[in-house]
Amino acid sequence: MACNCKKAIQIEDRYGTKIEESLLQKTRRTFGKILVLLIGFGLSIVVVPVITVVLIYNQIFREGKGITIPKMLSKYLK
């Protein structure tokens, strides 16, 4: 590994100081993780059907025109 992460983790485990979390901090961290998960899940539920409908509409009514991919991103698809 380029950053030598395994050795850094071992050194931190051996010589680092443990920081205790209070119940409030643990709850806040867990709530944050759950919130990010819910936002991601909610956006995927909304975005995927919209993209599907747009693709179907383009295939039927616009003679097969798909979604235009920017040139910057299309160079990675070749």
Image (cartoon, rainbow, N blue to C red):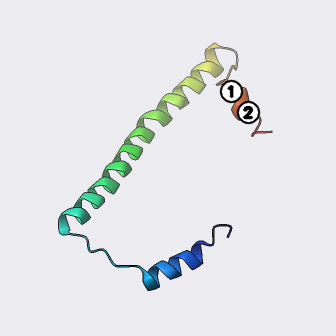
Residue pointed to by mark 2: 74
Left or right of residue 19, residue 64 in this image: right
16 above or below 61? below
Q: Residues within 10 Å of mark 2 (few under 14, many from 20)?
A: few
Give the farthest residue toward the top: 62
Q: Residues within 10 Å of mark 1 (few under 14, many from 20)?
A: few
The dot on residue 70 is 1
Which residue is at 36% across, 44% downward? 39
The dot on residue 15 is none
The percent position of residue 21, horizontal first and vertical second, equals: 25, 70
Give the farthest residue toward the bottom: 14
Left or right of residue 59, residue 45 in this image: left
The percent position of residue 36, horizontal first and vertical second, equals: 36, 49
Q: CA distance from mark 2 to mark 1?
A: 6 Å
Left or right of residue 54, residue 76 in this image: right
Q: Quadrant of residue 63?
A: top right
68 above or below 63? below
Which residue is at 41% across, 45% downward? 40
The percent position of residue 16, horizontal first and vertical second, equals: 41, 79
Q: Quadrant of residue 1?
A: bottom right
Residue closer to the observer: 77 or 58: 77
Residue closer to the observer: 17 or 55: 17
The percent position of residue 59, horizontal first and vertical second, equals: 65, 21
Q: Secondary structure at mark 2?
A: helix
Q: Please say if the residues under marks 2 and 1 sit with CB atoms less than 8 Å apart.
A: yes
Give the farthest residue toward the right: 78
Q: Secondary structure at mark 1?
A: loop
